[in-house]
Image (cartoon, rainbow, N blue to C red):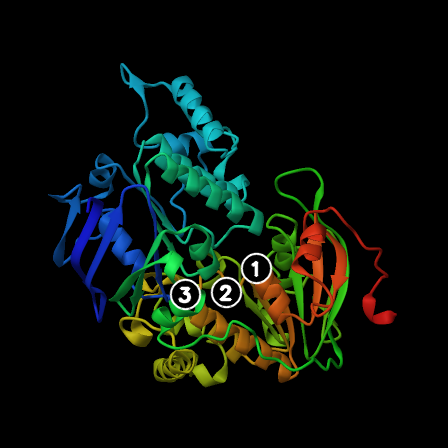
Amino acid sequence: MDYVIEMLNITKKFPGIIANDNITLQLKKGEVHALLGENGAGKSTLMSVLFGLYQPEEGVIKKNGEIVKIKNPNDANALNIGMVHQHFKLVDVFSVLDNIILGVEPNKFGFIQKAEARKKVIEISEKYGLKIDPDAMIEDISVGMQQRVEILKMLYRENEILIFDEPTAVLTPQEIDELMEIMRNFTKEGKSILFITHKLNEIMAVADRCTVLRKGKYMGTVEIKNTTKEELSQMMVGRNVNFKVDKKPSDPTDTILSVRGVSLPSKTHKADAVKDVSFDIRAGEIVCLAGIEGNGQTEFTYALTGLEKPSKGTITLCGQDITNMPIRERSKLGMSHIPEDRHKHGLVLDFTLEDNMVLQRYWEKDFQKNGFINKGAVRKYAERLIAQYDVRSGQGPITISRSMSGGNQQKAIIAREIDKDPKLLVAIQPTRGLDVGAIEYIHKQLVNERDNGKAVLLVSLELDEVMNVSDRILVMYEGEIVGEFDPEKTTVEELGLYMAGAKKQERKEDANEE
């Protein structure tokens, strides 16, 4: 059997943890090979070894049957191996074109030949249906677009082995379908794809074979046509996972959050990003703000949590006007915030896990002594949360947050925000990039908060999550709320029409006054 890439008996260790423990992975030419595993199972580490970002302690890598040494990403590129990382590696202040050619700029007599590069980039983008604007700045385009730039970077370098690390974590349902189509086209041309994910429907839809890792160990490789979602999730987490969220009907009481006529200007174009949004959330209900990425949800949550000031309208929390209130005061009033971007707004990556756990509480009397932070109390608190929320890290409370897997970073933020005992929990994409076991756990936490009489605002792009977790759904399109739904009485297809702007309801000032 000819394999284009073989990773044989790879072992990679970090302080306090064996990330890859004697793993073998074999990739055939022209196949989509999925790599499945929980957060922190060692998937990204294994791919980083193949891409030359890490050196393994043991094991060999073969390409077309011959042993190769990959000391850095340039070696990987020379072997035609390319990678789209989970957290994109793009220069925000560069244009799309500059990012694509970075490091392999065509030059003549020492001058960059941009016209030639632009022509090639446009040809490739048209060939694969990856429409982009070569002159747009990275910081101004959506994450879905940024991902296309990452894919074009690989194609521009004529890579034959393409590694996708969690490529769909930030995409809308429509973009995911497009990406699957692009992957199928790649394999028709004889390219080979390694696809890291923990979304089982995607594996079933696009992969030929799947290798499963659990806690750094190899669990086996299966042919997709001979397996089921249930079998894969069993291999991945070692138990049966419940894909349905168990919850009793909600019993909402007092209004906790009241939003009236809130608008917010857009940073990228002339129209407002948020236009005259009004709704209420009561204690004991989960209200979901659903919509396709880039329709104002992000800007609205910035206004709600204090990261931006609305241009008009009022926001009231527990009867107090918080429209212009500082973030710390909102937090003290009872707002918790699980942010969309865990790296930018959720954690200080170079702080330890324990310091991140008390970011919004270190001034409370429990955590200080005579004006100094009480390290012992902080450590005890962090240890309790780590155990309670199963946050996995190499060195416990003193682990540097940057070194943890994305899913465990997310669990740390969720532990911190829920433990503040908030009156309103604002959860934005809380399960982005998490595996089925962790998603099941977080959904339980959200429902528990609701059952304990908290108000929960969930902002999500995952339609399964929207339908499964929420008690009411508000659909946002181009900055406006275009519909309100009961998840029991609507379908994913109907929500999709409203999310795409094909339909719109007339709403009263607020639905609770009917």
Q: Marks 3 and 2, how far apart in space?
A: 8 Å
Of residues 311 and 494, the one nearer the viewer is 494
Q: Earlier in the sequence, mark 1 or mark 2?
A: 2
Does 129 sit above or below residue 293? above
Residue at the (44%, 34%) spot, across then down: 94
Choose mark 1 or mark 3, whichever is in front: 1
Residue 354, horizontal then vertical, whole percent = 37, 74
**Secondary element type, mark 3:** helix
- Residue that sits furthest to the front in the current view: 226
- For residue 407, the mark is 3
Q: Which amino acid lies under the numbered mark 3 shown in the image of this protein?
A: Gly
Q: Which residue is mark 2?
A: 431
Q: Marks 1 and 3, how far apart in space?
A: 16 Å
**Secondary element type, mark 1:** loop
Of residues 395 and 70, the one nearer the viewer is 70
Q: Is residue 394 visible?
A: yes
- Could you tell me if the residues under marks 1 and 2 are in contact, i.e. CB atoms within 8 Å? yes
Residue 189, horizontal then vertical, whole percent = 36, 34
Of residues 100 and 485, the one nearer the viewer is 485
- For residue 462, the mark is 1
Q: Which amino acid lies under the numbered mark 1 shown in the image of this protein?
A: Glu
Q: Earlier in the sequence, mark 3 or mark 2?
A: 3
Q: Which amino acid lies under the numbered mark 2 shown in the image of this protein?
A: Thr
Does 50 sit above or below residue 399? above
